[in-house]
Image (spheres, helix red, strand yellow):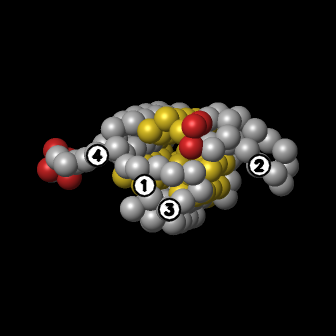
Amino acid sequence: MEGERFKNWKYPKIEEGKLTKYNWVVQHKEGLLLGEKTDIGAFTYINAKNSVEIGEGVQVGSHCSIYSESTIDGKAGRVVLEKNCRIGSHCTIMPGVTVGENSVIGAHSLVNCDIPANVVAFGCPARVVKSVGGER
């Protein structure tokens, strides 16, 4: 099924501060590393001033905010969304955070610390609740 979904995937045209054809936007586009077969939902905002790396096969829901810099608390740092992780809609990812490979972040979560690989996490702030496909 996944093979069909991304059969015709092409790297999107990204212009500084402008909506892509999929209706998401990047500031500091030179700091964005985007893997293949990614799926980023409409109205997602990515601030890549201090680097944002989105790995292969990552899915980001609509209306998410990914910050490598926060003007509210002065934090800054690289954000990494590792291969095949999934971020639910309306999530906020704060500076310096890594979401591990295959992990799932529930909708409306605030991710302000690293999330390991192969887990499900959600909440405000997001906390690990179980492993992917099993108990915790």
| Mark in front: 4 vs 2 | 4
Q: Observer-nearest residue: 133 or 124?
A: 124
Q: Is residue 51 visible?
A: yes
Q: Is residue 96 visible?
A: no
Q: Which residue is mark 1?
A: 40
| Mark in front: 1 vs 3 | 3
Q: Which residue is mark 2?
A: 70
Residue at figure coordinates x 25%, y 47% from the top left: 9
Question: SS for tag 1?
Answer: strand
Q: Observer-nearest residue: 135 or 68?
A: 68
Above or below 45: residue 131: above
Q: Which residue is mark 4?
A: 10
Amino acid marked by disc 3: Leu
Above or below 131: residue 89: below
Could you tell me how far apart the alpha carbons at marks 1 and 3 are, in whole angstroms?
A: 12 Å
Could you tell me how far apart the alpha carbons at marks 1 and 4 are, in whole angstroms?
A: 13 Å
Query: Label 2 neighbourhood size at 10 Å, few (<14), some (14-19), many (20+)?
Result: some
Q: Is there CB contact under 8 Å for labels 1 and 2? A: no
Query: Label 3 neighbourhood size at 10 Å, few (<14), some (14-19), many (20+)?
Result: some
The label on residue 19 is 3
Q: Is residue 32 left or right of residue 112?
A: left
Amino acid marked by disc 4: Lys
Could you tell me how far apart the alpha carbons at marks 4 and 3 are, in whole angstroms?
A: 16 Å
Residue furthest right as drawn: 73
Q: Is residue 2 left or right of residue 63?
A: left
Q: Is residue 49 left or right of residue 91?
A: right
Q: Is residue 124 left or right of residue 84?
A: right
Amino acid marked by disc 1: Ile
Above or below 1: residue 51: above
